[in-house]
């Protein structure tokens, strides 16, 4: 009788030990699987500003205010002009810019012709080895709002600070008109208003 009880007890201990091994093995396998998944997800996440902007779903996360539209506009243009990149990335960034174009502006700028013009402009900019230091837009309080032909419009200025290869800084001002389309602020038109030299102090400002 004593031997049978001892034998049963040993079997229970062995069974529990094996079950512990199974659970530990399963936990290790699960941990390794999750680690691989995290590494794969990490590899798939955009790493650079260019990649982030190309991957951005602008239409479904559209900027809410004219100033926010212009901030995104500035980010995309800064990437375009400051990075000598292949045609595929240039085209992807230009498509992102065009998401912010009004219906009428898209009609006036056929995609193929638009891309050709921008690529030509980029080549000239890259050859000069200029760099865009920063973009800044009017504060919300300085934006002018008007109703034109029953459309709500916003008038806003962007300032682009450029460092030049020959030395020194240049400040370029662009005036934009944005109009409400389907409750989204879209770019109706824009033009460069003026350029002027800028100081190191201006460049150092945030």
Image (cartoon, rainbow, N blue to C red):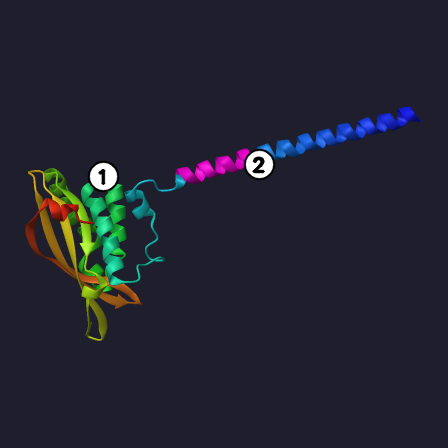
Residue 58 is left or right of residue 169, and the answer is right
Residue 197 is left or right of residue 116, and the answer is left
**164 or 55: which is nearer to us?**
164
Q: Residue at x 54, y 33 (%)?
A: 32
Whether residue 186 can be seen here = yes
- Tell me if mark 1 has few (under 14), some (14-19) or many (20+) residues whose alpha carbon lies within 10 angstroms of its own: few
Q: Which mark is residue 85?
A: 1
The quadrant of the image that shows the N terminus is top right
Q: Which residue is drawn at 13% across and 49% down?
A: 202
Highlighted magenta segment, given as a residue range? 30-43
Magenta highlight: main SS: helix
Q: Alpha carbon of mark 2 to alpha carbon of mark 1: how far?
A: 41 Å
Above or below, comparing residue 120 to residue 186 in the picture? above
**Residue 34 in the image: x percent, y percent?**
52, 38
- Tell me if mark 2 has few (under 14), some (14-19) or many (20+) residues whose alpha carbon lies within 10 angstroms of its own: few
**Residue 146 in the image: x percent, y percent?**
19, 72
Whether residue 119 can be seen here = no
Q: Residue 147 carries which label?
A: none
Residue 6 colored in magenta in the image:
no
Give the secondary structure at mark 1: loop
Identity of the residue furthest to the right in this view: 1
Residue 37 colored in magenta in the image:
yes
Q: Residue 30 carries which label?
A: 2
Give the secondary structure at mark 2: helix
Marks 2 & 1, CB-CB < 8 Å contact: no
Q: Which residue is drawn at 57% across and 36% down?
A: 30
Closer to the chain start, of discs 2 and 1, is: 2
**7 or 102: which is nearer to us?**
7
Which numbered mark, 2 or 1, is in the foreground of this view?
2
């Amino acid at each position: 009788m004593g031997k049978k009880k001892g034998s049963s007890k040993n079997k229970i201990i062995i069974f529990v030990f094996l079950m512990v091994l199974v659970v530990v093995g399963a936990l290790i396998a699960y941990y390794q699987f999750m680690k691989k998944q995290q590494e794969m997800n990490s590899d798939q996440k955009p790493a650079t500003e260019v990649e982030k902007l190309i991957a951005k779903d602008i239409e479904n996360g559209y900027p809410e205010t004219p100033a926010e539209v212009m901030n995104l506009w500035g980010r995309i243009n800064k990437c375009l002009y400051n990075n000598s990149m292949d045609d595929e990335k240039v085209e992807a960034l230009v498509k992102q810019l065009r998401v912010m174009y009004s219906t009428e502006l898209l009609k006036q700028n056929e995609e193929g012709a638009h891309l050709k013009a921008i690529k030509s402009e980029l080549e000239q900019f890259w050859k000069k080895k200029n760099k865009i230091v920063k973009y800044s837009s009017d504060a919300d309080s300085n934006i002018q709002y008007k109703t034109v032909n029953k459309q709500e419009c916003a008038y806003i200025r962007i300032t682009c600070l450029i460092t030049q290869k020959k030395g020194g800084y240049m400040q370029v001002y662009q005036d934009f008109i944005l109009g409400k389309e389907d409750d989204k602020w879209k770019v109706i038109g824009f033009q460069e208003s003026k350029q002027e030299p800028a100081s190191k102090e201006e460049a150092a400002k945030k």
